[in-house]
Amino acid sequence: EIVLTQSPGTLSLSPGERATLSCRASQSVESKYLVWYQQKPGQAPRLLIYGTSNRATGIPDRFSGSGSGTDFTLTISRLEPEDFAVYYCHQLDTSPRTFGQGTKVEIK
Amino acid sequence: QVQLVQSGAEVKKPGASVKVSCKASGYTFTNYAMHWVRQAPGQRLEWMGWINVGNGNLKYSQKLQGRVTITRDTSASTVYMELRSLRSEDTAVYYCAREQSVSGDSCYDYWGQGTQVTVSS
């Protein structure tokens, strides 16, 4: 089973700042199968990035993804008030599909 | 527009079973696989299994194998997830999620609203 470890656990930032979230895999993940979701309290996860770096429909360009192999990054260039949420990475490369434990981006 | 609408919250006693439904609309139901994911309080998302809605092929998490069954009714555009021999640690929000494949990249592009299942004596 591929274990995804996200860091940091919590990121305390102000609106307008840059957020950098990390996802490290216990073994290599093919880039086409690395995904990022955003989740707000009481809501289902929302697709942000698929295939490591492709923004989903309607996702603003302040969100970007990068990485390869075992190290992947989600960057939010300038935080907007609606971006404060929990972010999960997810791999669909091998079964069982697994998720990271999440990074909470909170208002400082 | 694509919608996945799940059945309502359930409260069950330990040892009982629960069946959650996920009704799809707004797309060709048989063209996409459907997955089930759960989220226990304070825990990460956990993949439970998936069904190829077109041909009925299945795969389950080894952890839940033997307790979980995923089925589909193509005439009703609905996928079901049944979990048996419930334990307190099965208390979670259960989601269905559609798998999309875009130029070979896979993701879950639409999710149901979630169904709270509470297991308590």
Image (tube, coloured by chain):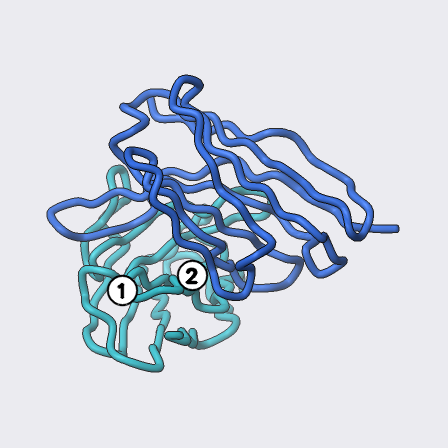
Chain colours: A cyan, B blue
Kindly identify the residue that appears in the image at 42 percent across and 52 percent down: A38
Residue closer to the observer: A52 or A97: A97
Q: Residue at 47% of width from left, 47% of height from top?
A: B36
Q: Residue B56's x, y, as percent?
A: 35, 38
User: Which tag, 1 or 2, sits closer to the chain's start?
Assistant: 2
Badge 1 element: loop
Give above or below for B86 relative to A108. Answer: above
Q: Which residue is mark 2?
A: A88
Residue A94 falls in image quadrant? bottom left
Instruction: Say which quarter of the image contains residue A68.
Output: bottom left
Q: At 56% from the left edge and 39% from the top edge, which residue is drawn?
A: B114
In front: label 1 or label 2: 1
Q: Which residue is mark 1?
A: A93
Q: Residues within 10 Å of mark 1 (few under 14, many from 20)?
A: some
Quadrant hosting residue B42: bottom right
Residue B105 horizontal side relative to residue B90, left or right: left
Q: CA distance from mark 1 to mark 2?
A: 16 Å
Q: Residue furthest top?
A: B75
Whether residue B99 is situated above or below residue A12 in the rendered picture: above
Residue most toward the bottom? A26
Q: Residue at x 49, y 51 (%)?
A: B37
* Closer-to-camera residue (B106/A65): B106
The amino acid sitting under disc 1 is Asp
Mark 2 belongs to which amino acid? Answer: Tyr
Give the quarter of the figure containing the N terminus of chain B. top left
